[in-house]
Structure formats: structure tokens, C-alpha cells
Amino acid sequence: MPDNIPFPLYHGTSTLFMDSIFSEGLGGIDPIKKNRIIDLAREVKSLADANLADCPDYQSRRFSFDQMTKQSTGQFNWQHGESYLSPSIHTAIRYATNKRFGSEIVTYTLDILTELIRRKIPGVTDNLFQKYPQAFGWLDSSPSPLLIRVNDVSRAYLESETNTSCSQQIAKLESLLKHEPKSFGLVGQQMNFRLSGPISANQIELFLIQVTEWQSHGPTFNLYPINPTKTELG
């Protein structure tokens, strides 16, 4: 059995994390852990529960945000910090374009934090700012959606997102690719893999995503490749 899987995998994020991906590779740094985002999210949730009872946007997100702060598992995976890869480019595109900061928990946390700041809730711009300066710095950023394509991924670097067998998932996708290629994309949208080791920058391709039209099944888009060397030179 070949060590590398015979199809590419995709990861959706944003340019907010592009520099660290260039320098450390995909999965080389955990920005959620490094910047203590889960700790911040828990403090933001406590303040939001106490002060945003009249905010429909927060109330509509409250359950999901609660599961993220608890890092719950079960029917849905609410764990964050590790890199996840999909065999479906459309899954990665939807994630990148629906999450303004390229991460679900970062987007929820910063959106709710913005509302707390707007309402001038005590303890936000002083205490929280001193504890989480990097996250507050992200509030002023305007990141663009980013697609990462990884070719020739080693099987040893992949784990299943759920309790199902990773090898069984890969075998199913390989069989579809060979015998029912038209079904590969649809089935691939239902499978994600957890990256268990870093992939260096020279093993990946990066693309800026330009959404040209929003449709019910997802966005229509253009992709623009990014050259790390040119980016570093400005």
C-alpha cells in the first residue's frame, strides 16, 4: 500500500494565519493555544451571558459558542486548535468564506467581543485587553479567505475526525476515485481528517479565494495562487 494518499486534501482558513503557515508549515503552530483563544472565549461568554440577553445575534449563537468553550465532542466536533483537512475543496472553501477570521472559535469570540466593546461593558477594554493583546489586535484586521491544498499527504499524518477508522475512510475514497469518480466530491464533503503532524510550507499550495457569487449550495469562486517568496519580498 503506498504511503501517500492518491488525492489532495484541502484546508480553509484566512490570511490572518498565513505568516505562521509560511514559517512553520500547516499545523506547525497552534494559534488557538498560542494566543489562549479558548480562555478568552470562556471569559467573553461569561460577560456575554451577563450583558447580552437582549442581543438576538448572540442568543442565536449562544448554544454553539457554549459548546466551543467546552470543547465538546459528540454528534458534532466542537474541538479547535488542530488542523483539519477535507478531500472536498468545496467544504474547505465554505469554511474559509463563512468564517471571517479563518477559524470558527476565533470568529465567534471576536464577533461577540466586538459587541461587548460597542456596549462599553466594564472589564473588557482594560482587563481582557491586558490578558489577550494579540486577539484584540486581530479586531482591526481585515483578513481574506485562504485555501490550502496539500498533495501527497502521508497516511501516517492523518487521523479520523470521529471515532470511525481513518484507514476505512481513505479506502472508501480511493475506491470511489477509481470506480465512481462522480461520487467522490459529494462523499468527500462528509469526511474530514485531523492532521497529526506539521506539513512544511514547501509541501502545500496556497490560494486567495475571491467569491464571485453566493448560491444556496455554496459560493462560486476564483482562486489566485500565492507565492511565498513574492509575499515575503512584498
Image (spheres, helix red, strand yellow):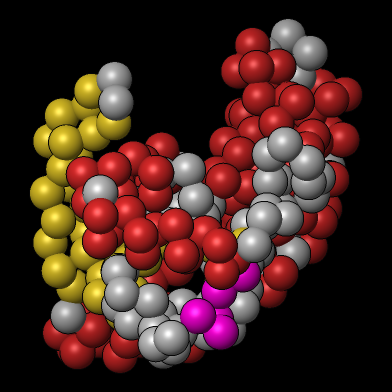
Q: Is residue 125 left or right of residue 94?
A: right
Secondary structure mostly seen in the magenta stretch: helix
Q: Is residue 229 left or right of residue 55?
A: left
Q: Position of residue 45 (x, y in %)?
A: 80, 36
Q: Position of residue 109 (x, y in %)?
A: 65, 43
Residue 161 lies within the magenta run: no
Q: Is residue 198 above or below residue 115?
A: below
Asked if one can make out residue 117 in the rendered structure from this viewpoint, the answer is: no
Magenta part of the protein: which range? 155-159
Q: Is residue 15 above or below residue 18?
A: above
Location of the C terminus (image quadrant): bottom left
Location of the N terminus (image quadrant): bottom left
Nearer the observer, 90 or 184? 184
Give the residue furthest to the front.
Answer: 179
Asked if one can make out residue 102 in the rendered structure from this viewpoint, the answer is: yes
Q: Is residue 65 above or below residue 102?
A: above
Q: How many marks?
A: 0
